Structures are given as C-alpha cells and as structure tokens.
Image (tube, coloured by chain):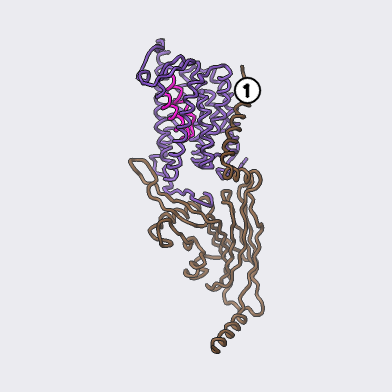
Chain colours: A purple, B brown
Amino acid sequence: MLIYLPIAELSVNMLIILGMGGAVGFLSGLFGVGGGFLLTPLLIFSGVPPVVSVATVATQVVASSASAALSYWRRRMVDMKLATALMLSGIVGTLIGIVVFNTLRALGQLDLIVGISYVTFLGLIGGLMLTESVRAILNARAGRPAPLRRPGQHNWVHRLPLKMRFKRSKLYISVIPVVALGIGIGFLGVLLGIGGGFILVPALIYLFRVPSNVVVGTSLIQIVATMAVATVLHAVTNHSVDAVLAVILMVGGVIGAQFGARIGQNMRGDQLRALLGLLVLAVAIRFLTDLIATPDERYSLSLLSGGSL
Amino acid sequence: MKWLAGAGIVLLLAATVAHGEDLTIALSQPEVRIDSNFTGTTIAIFGVIQRNAATVSRSQGYDVAVLASGPLESVVARRKDRILGVWANRAAEAIVSVPSFYSLNTSRDVDALAPPSLLAHLGIGFRYINFTYGDRDAVNDPAAAEFRDAYIRLKSQSGLYDEQQGGVTFIGDTIFRSAMRIPANVPVGRYTVGVYLFSGGAFLAKASAPFEVTKTGFESYMFSIARSQSLLYGLGCVALALVTGWLAGVIFRRD
C-alpha cells in the first residue's frame, strides 16, 4: 500500500513505515526509552532523506514522550523547577543546534557528522550499558548482591558555584552542570533527531543524584519541550517536517509501545538493559560500516533551487 | 537597392516552392497530477507528418526525436573521498540551471539522426545538454566532466533522465507514437515536449507542446503550507503530536 509523502517527496509503503513505527514503539515501551535513536537511523537506512528523517522523528518523539510525561505528571512524579531549568537551557541548545545543522547541511557534511555522532554516542552508551548489565547478571548468578550507592555520596558536580535548591529532588546543586546538560541534550536533539532520554536519565541519576521517583518524569518534560521546539525550528528553517510520515510513525509507535510495556513488565531489568545495549551497539556498527566501507556510489546531489531529487 | 529587393523576392519564392513538412503532435494528457497514491505514469505522444503537393520528396525515410524536459534546477554534486579511514564529501561542483527532467525517445540511434553540430545546437542527447557551473565561466567545462557524468548517472538511476533509442515507433509512413515514463519522484512545474523531425541527417521541422506536473488535493495543500506558513505548520505538527500523545494516554490508560 503505497502512500506519497508530500515533504519527503517520495512514495513509501505505508505498512512498512507503520511496522517500523510499531517495532520501535514496541522497543521503546519494552525498554522505557524514547526510540528516536532507533527510528531516525531506520528511516535513513530505508531511503528517507536524513534532513526529513531527523525533523520528522522530532515530531514523533513529542507524541511518544507526551503520553508518558502526562502520566508521570498526573502522579506528581516531576520536579518542575529542575524540569524548567533543563527546558530553558534545552531551548538554547536547540537554537545552537539548528544553526550547526543548517551550516553542516550547506557544507554537505551533515550526513558525515550525523553518522560520526551516532557511532560515538551509541557506541559509548551501548558499550557501557552492556558491560554494566552483564556484570549485574553475573553478580546475580553468583548470588552476590549488587553494589549499593550511598545517597549522600558527592562528586565534582556538587563542588561547583551558583548553587540552587531543587526542593522536589531534595538537591542543592550548582546550576552550571544543569544548564550544560540541558543545552547538550537540546543540541543533540535537533542535530540527530533523538529525544536524548538515554543520556539524560543516566546523567541525572549518576551525576546529580536526582531521586529515581522523579527522574523519568522530569526528563520526559524536558524531552517534550525541546523536541517540540526542534520540530518548529526544522519546519521554519528547512521545511523538512513531513506531517504524513509523522502521523504514520506516531500511530505505529503508540500501539507498539503498549505491547512493549506489557512484555517489559515480565522481564528482568538487567536482561532488558543487556538487550538494549546490544541493540544500541548494532545501530552504531551499522553507521560505522556506512562510514568506512567503500561506497557503491561516491557522488551525491543536493538541491540548491527548483526541481527535486 | 534594386538588386537587393530582387534577391528578396527570389528567396521568398524559394521558401514557398521548397515547402517543408508540417508536424502536428498531441499528448495523451496535458497535466500530471500527483496525489497520495501517485506511483508514476506514462504520457503517450502521437504525431503526424503532413505533406502536400509542394513538399519536396525525400529519398530517405523520416527520423523523429521526442524530447521532454522539465523545470530547471540548480544542484551541488559532491564526491566522497577517504579521509582518515572515513568516506566524506570533499570535492564539489555547483551545477546551475540544468533540466531537472530529461527524457529522450528517438526512432533510431541518436548519433544517426543528424551531425553532432546540429544535435548540439538542438540540445538532443545527454552529451549535448548545456551544463553551466557555479564557479566556472565555460559551458561544459571539461574540468567538471566527472560531476556532469555523475549528475547524469544519478538522475538516470532515479528515472528522471532517460534515453530510449527506438522509443519512437512509426505506425505508418507519416504517423508515429512514443511513450514517456514519468516516475513517482518527478518534480512539479512546467514541462515541454519538443518533437524534432529529421530526414537524411537534415533537420526539417519542430513542434512542441507543454504539460504541467502539479500536486493536487491534500499533498499540494501540505506542501504549500509547509513552505508558505512554515511557523503555523510547525506549531500544527507539535499540536498534532501532543494530541496524539494525550489520546494514546487516554485510550491505553492502565491506572
């Protein structure tokens, strides 16, 4: 069943895109991640131009994160002050990101930088996730208890100036790392079409010691806000948000996530993390082979004006 | 001045005596509409070569070239090179105002139609398309040939550039037809079909007809809104996403 995408300007099989959205939605429900880091590469690998993929997945991430954010909000599992600080700095990050994105695009180096960034981030995060979860699985097999982290433990983050109190998280920390993290996530969100939850959540837990009951809700609020801004920025500067593609992905994603979440409840956390780590590494390796393998076609065209490619 | 006027009359007489063929063509559709299930189409071109008593007799048969070309576009062609083990875009060439669509059907080999100078003048055949480059003065500068070849190859792969030798068939001595494939990724805009009539290497007549490629209905609406009202469009997409997310939360609510 072919459908014409008005912005991407190509015909795609609607069922394949729906299935793709559903599969990524399933995984995001299963692992509790946004899925942007899987969906953007999948779209690029299936022939949707990277510019359209990145922009449209930003829209899809708004939808998938909004429904989760809403349920955390209802249960009051959000630190609104921390979320606002992250959100405002995230918006600054998206503004920087869109300038870099458009400059790279004009220079013809967007695909390269997106590829290198995916290899770096996914390789790093996937590797860390895999080693951590394998260690946890081995510990559980050997019957050793997992090493506990003491809540009072401080690190370099807590010694920085400009401290601010975040009551809901019971934190008194410098705003510098908070703002830096927000900017970084917003920047990556625009550039790579990812929500950034898989970086934000570990950072909030391990660097800032944000209590686990508010960490996911708070990061979801930040993701919804920055990806909404990213969508608007892409729409205004590149005209590259494909609403038809976004709707198909959203519908698939929303349905897939429900099944994923149900199955995820019956699996152990360390096994889930090991699987997710493998998946993330696989995407990184795919990007790496695209970067280093001799391409079939060394030439490419990009449009300046008129026509279409 | 008298001799000049006399020469003029002689020329005028010659023009009426050696009367050339008239060419009449018709397209199967004057418009290609791109809608949500557009997967490409085919335009048929019919032509009639009209002769009358005054037309000179031809010792050789007729040859026809049907050339459809689309709106002009400007692109950057880039070449990947290996840098530090990674393939990255290095050399680039801006190609300015080149047809975004070029489909040529001929009744026989392009080179057999007419001498190269005539083909070049008429722009018939891939190699006679005028390529101008952003930062080169000469047209068809040989230094940029690799990018020009790459452009033609990539466009051919996407179906937007096409050469079919034998793509024009004669039904009778003076009636011919041709079919031109319009792929799904065809750019919107105004197209021109030019039909060129040759005999024995000489160019006899030309007829042309336009057709339009447009997006219709919902697709056209989305495309133009995304460009002209981009802020509104972006905000609309965000609103749509938020509503979808909220709806999903309501429908699948477990608590």
Can see residue A47? no
Q: Position of residue B183 (x, y in %)?
A: 58, 51
Q: Residue furthest bottom?
A: B2
* Residue identified by numbered label 1: B252
Answer with left or right where residue A187 lies relative to residue B251: left
Instruction: Name the quadrant containing residue A65.
Output: top right
Segment colored magenta: A178-205
Secondary element type, mark 1:
loop
Residue A36 on the magenta span? no
Dot 1 amino acid type: Phe
Residue drawn 51% across the image and 51% down it: A305
Residue nearer the viewer, A21 or A163: A163
Comparing B90 with A42, the one in front is B90
Q: Nearer the viewer, residue B77 or A43?
A: B77
Q: Quadrant of the N terminus of chain A?
A: top right
> Counting other residues with Cα less than 10 Å from the Cα at mark 1, is it few (<14), some (14-19), or many (20 or more)?
few
| Residue at mark 1: chain | B
Where is residue B19? Give x, y as percent.
62, 78
